[in-house]
Amino acid sequence: LYHRGDFPAAARFVNQIPENRAFSPKIFHLKGLIAEGLGDQDAALAEYQKAVDFNKAHLKSRLRIASIHNAKGQLKEAARHLDVIVNE
C-alpha cells in the first residue's frame, strides 16, 4: 500500500500493530514514511525517533530525521543525527 502511494490505507494497516508489540524499528520507520507521505512532518519525526529509541543504530531513521530538521532550518539538530550516521 505504501509503495503504491496509498498512504491513508497504509496508515490504517500499520496502525493495527500496537506500539508495545512492535518487533522491529522498521515498524516505526514505516510509520514515519507514511506520515511524511501524508504531509505530517511532526508525526514523522516522532515515529522516526521511536525507531531510533528502539535501535540507536537505525540509520535510515536518523537520515530521515536529519532531512526533516534540515528542511526546517534546524541545522544543529540535523547535524547531530548526521554525526551519528557518519561515525557508525
Image: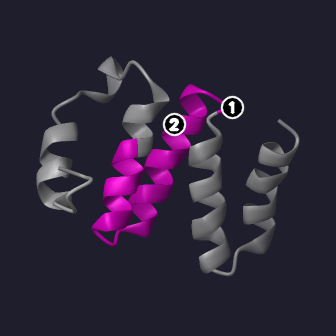
Residue at horizontal 37%, vertical 34%? 27
- What secondary structure is the stretch in magenta mostly built from? helix
Residue that protrudes farthest toward the front in the picture: 4
How many other residues sit within 10 Å of disc 1, few (<14), some (14-19) or many (≥20)?
A: some
Residue 87 spot, x, y in % from top left: 88, 41
Residue 74 spot, x, y in % from top left: 70, 74
Q: Tell me: 4 left or right of 65.
A: left
Give yes or no for residue 37 being in the magenta stretch. Answer: yes
Residue at horizontal 20%, vertical 58%? 4
Q: Quadrant of residue 23?
A: top left
How many other residues sit within 10 Å of disc 2, few (<14), some (14-19) or many (≥20)?
A: many
| Residue 12 vs residue 18, the one in the foreground | 12
Residue 81 spot, x, y in % from top left: 74, 52
What is the magenta range?
30-57
Mark linked to residue 51: 2
Q: Is residue 28 above or below residue 47?
A: above
Identify the image's colour scheme: rainbow, by chain, secondary structure or one colour. one colour
Q: Tell me: 25 left or right of 69.
A: left
Which quarter shows the C terminus? top right
Q: What amino acid is labelled 2 in the image?
A: Ala
Residue beneath label 1, please?
57
Residue 28 spot, x, y in % from top left: 41, 39
Residue at horizontal 81%, vertical 67%? 76
| Residue 43 vs residue 63, the one in the foreground | 63
Q: Tell me: 7 left or right of 59.
A: left
Mark linked to residue 3: none
SS under mark 2:
helix
Q: What amino acid is labelled 1 in the image?
A: Ala
Q: Is residue 72 above or below residue 31?
A: below
Q: Tell me: 46 left or right of 12.
A: right
